[in-house]
């Protein structure tokens, strides 16, 4: 390669950037809710099993691939085998779908941060969220025009990302020092506030009391693996491209363990902060804990605001802090979604990074506009489901097969052991070659069968079909991009 690849300025920048990518909205609203609906404390068992059998091994794999191939996902896969390049593109298209709607959730946070100042959601946070804020239409077929406040928030998010990424990974390395530490400080404040509220322990109890019957349900295991992938940002090319900016002497295995445990620990911790408040709410409303929480999105934008409103002092401040927490968590995850996509193009065709970034920003913003409409909420939900349940799982399966059987797991392991601070054993080969494809393959098929039988949610079948078509088209597009020749071969 003629020109120098960009580099992290230090190991800390890299680890912080990876942790920043991993820790996101997924930890603070998704994890507590998923744990709550999947057996409470019992969910922690499948979760940690998923982390050890799939999360950490796959993270080691992605770090090793990026670091060894020194390229973003498509080019890295092409180096394993010419016909594998499309896998990398599928990963990038999956992350593209995410970066179309992720900043829309961030835009809700911008708006709610402002509402916090006057506790603008009033007594009925649920009605406020759906009727006043989203102004939700009656179904995905009715888009009902743009909600301007959401569009403005979306524009702000994209502008912020553009400015950060434009300066390259050196600046990313600096920004993440703040976007990783600030949310942690806020989280600690929220935890102390939460735990000192009456009823807090009821909530925490609910979070930690295991329901061991739940462990026997396959759905709980699927949820655990899905959560681990989403949260660690696996199967999306993010970690591959981040580690491709590592210099040749850097460690892999230890970094992967630090990142994974940092992320999982944050989820576990955030569970306490959220559930103490939920317990408080239950006590204030005089109902049991199971009655107060609603859906995943609801936890952050409905249950939490309701509880904030009831706080005895400084309620606006805690409201503001909570949404600031979500924003600072979201921002570094958001740029970790855009960076691999941009790098996919610059690595293969040697386009100028600035140009690609401008195009991606404009196009990503425009695609996101669909989710800022009054019916956009439904589409956000549908696209999120397809991407996370099928897109990411598919990439992870393909990735482990390509490396495990074609490149050979043992060969990559040798390489990892050459550079890492500790050696990984044969267990890793087994995780990559057997456990990952098996567990994910079975999950994938079970979920597909369920989907075909029952459809997704309460949506009309054409709407879920459209979600599947989008994914299908993107997979075909991945093959097309693979066929287009790279510049130096042309
Ligand atoms: N892991 C992030 C979260 O938990 C989401 C994310 C997805 C980040 C894809 C990067 C890539 O919110």
Image: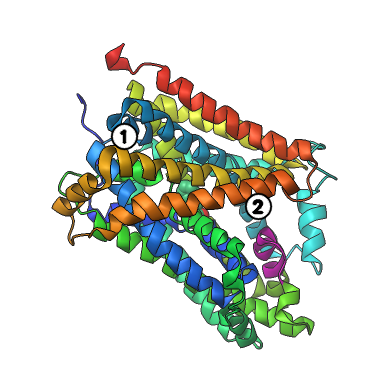
Camera-side residue of 384 and 217: 217
Q: Which residue is drawn at 41% across and 39% down?
A: 339
Q: Give above or below for 125 relative to 202.
A: above
Report whether 132 appears left or right of 228. right
Q: Is residue 175 magenta?
A: no
Q: In this view, does 118 lie to the left or right of 262?
A: right
Q: How crowded is mark 2: few (under 14 residues within 10 Å), some or many (20 or more)?
A: many
Q: What element carries label 2?
A: helix
Nearest the eye: 176 or 418: 418
The numbered mark, 2 or 1, whose residue comes first in the sequence reads 1
Determine whether 96 is above or below 25 in the image.
Answer: above
Q: Mark 1 points at which residue?
A: 76
Q: How many labels does the image show?
A: 2
- Residue name at image x 70 percent, y 74 percent: 307
Image coordinates of residue 225 in percent, x first then y, are: 50, 58
In the image, residue 212 above or below residue 347: below
Q: Give the range drawn in magenta.
A: 293-305
Q: Please tell me whether mark 2 or mark 1 is closer to you in this view.
A: 1
Image coordinates of residue 67 in percent, x first then y, are: 25, 43
Q: Mark 2 points at which residue?
A: 108
> What secondary structure predominates along the stretch shown in magenta?
helix
């Amino acid at each position: 390669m003629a020109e120098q690849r960009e580099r992290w300025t230090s190991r800390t920048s890299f680890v912080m950037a990876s942790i920043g990518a991993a820790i996101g909205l997924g930890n603070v609203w998704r994890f507590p809710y998923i744990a709550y609906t999947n057996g409470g404390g019992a969910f922690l068992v499948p979760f940690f099993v998923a982390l050890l059998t799939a999360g950490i091994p796959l993270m080691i794999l992605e770090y090793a691939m990026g670091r060894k191939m020194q390229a973003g996902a498509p080019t890295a896969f092409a180096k394993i085998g010419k016909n594998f390049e499309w896998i990398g593109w599928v990963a990038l298209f999956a992350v593209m779908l995410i970066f179309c709607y992720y900043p829309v959730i961030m835009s809700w946070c911008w708006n709610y941060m402002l509402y916090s100042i006057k506790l603008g959601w009033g007594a009925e946070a649920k009605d406020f969220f759906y009727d006043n804020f989203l102004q939700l239409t009656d179904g995905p077929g009715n888009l009902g025009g743009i909600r301007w406040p959401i569009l403005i928030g979306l524009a702000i998010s994209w502008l912020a990302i553009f400015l950060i990424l434009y300066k390259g990974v050196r600046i990313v390395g600096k920004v993440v020092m703040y976007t990783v530490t600030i949310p942690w400080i806020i989280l600690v404040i929220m935890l102390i506030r939460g735990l000192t509220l009456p009823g807090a322990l009821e909530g925490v109890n609910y979070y930690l009391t295991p329901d061991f019957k739940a462990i026997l349900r396959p759905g709980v295991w699927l949820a655990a693996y899905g959560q681990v992938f989403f949260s660690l940002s696996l199967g999306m090319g993010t970690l591959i491209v981040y580690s491709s900016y590592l210099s040749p002497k850097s460690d892999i295995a230890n970094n992967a363990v630090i990142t994974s445990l940092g992320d999982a620990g944050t989820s576990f911790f955030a569970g306490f902060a959220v559930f103490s408040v939920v317990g408080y709410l239950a006590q204030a409303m005089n109902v049991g804990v199971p009655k107060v929480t609603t859906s995943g999105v609801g936890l952050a934008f409905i249950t939490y605001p309701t509880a904030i409103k009831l706080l005895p002092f400084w309620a606006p401040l805690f409201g503001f802090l909570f949404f600031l927490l979500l924003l600072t968590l979201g921002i570094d995850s958001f740029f970790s979604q855009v960076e691999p996509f941009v790098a996919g193009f610059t690595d293969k065709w040697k386009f100028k990074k600035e140009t690609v970034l401008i195009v991606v920003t404009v196009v990503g913003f425009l695609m996101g506009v669909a989710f800022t409409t009054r019916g956009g909420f439904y589409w956000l939900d549908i696209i999120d489901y397809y991407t996370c349940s099928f897109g990411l799982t598919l990439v992870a399966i393909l990735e482990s097969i390509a490396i495990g059987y074609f490149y050979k797991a043992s060969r990559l392991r040798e390489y990892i052991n050459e550079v890492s601070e500790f050696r990984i054993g044969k267990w890793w080969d087994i995780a990559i070659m057997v456990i990952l494809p098996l567990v994910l393959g079975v999950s994938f098929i079970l979920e597909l069968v369920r989907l075909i039988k029952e459809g997704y949610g309460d949506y009309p079948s054409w709407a879920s079909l459209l979600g599947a078509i989008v994914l299908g088209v993107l997979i075909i597009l991945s093959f097309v991009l693979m066929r287009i020749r790279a510049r130096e071969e042309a």
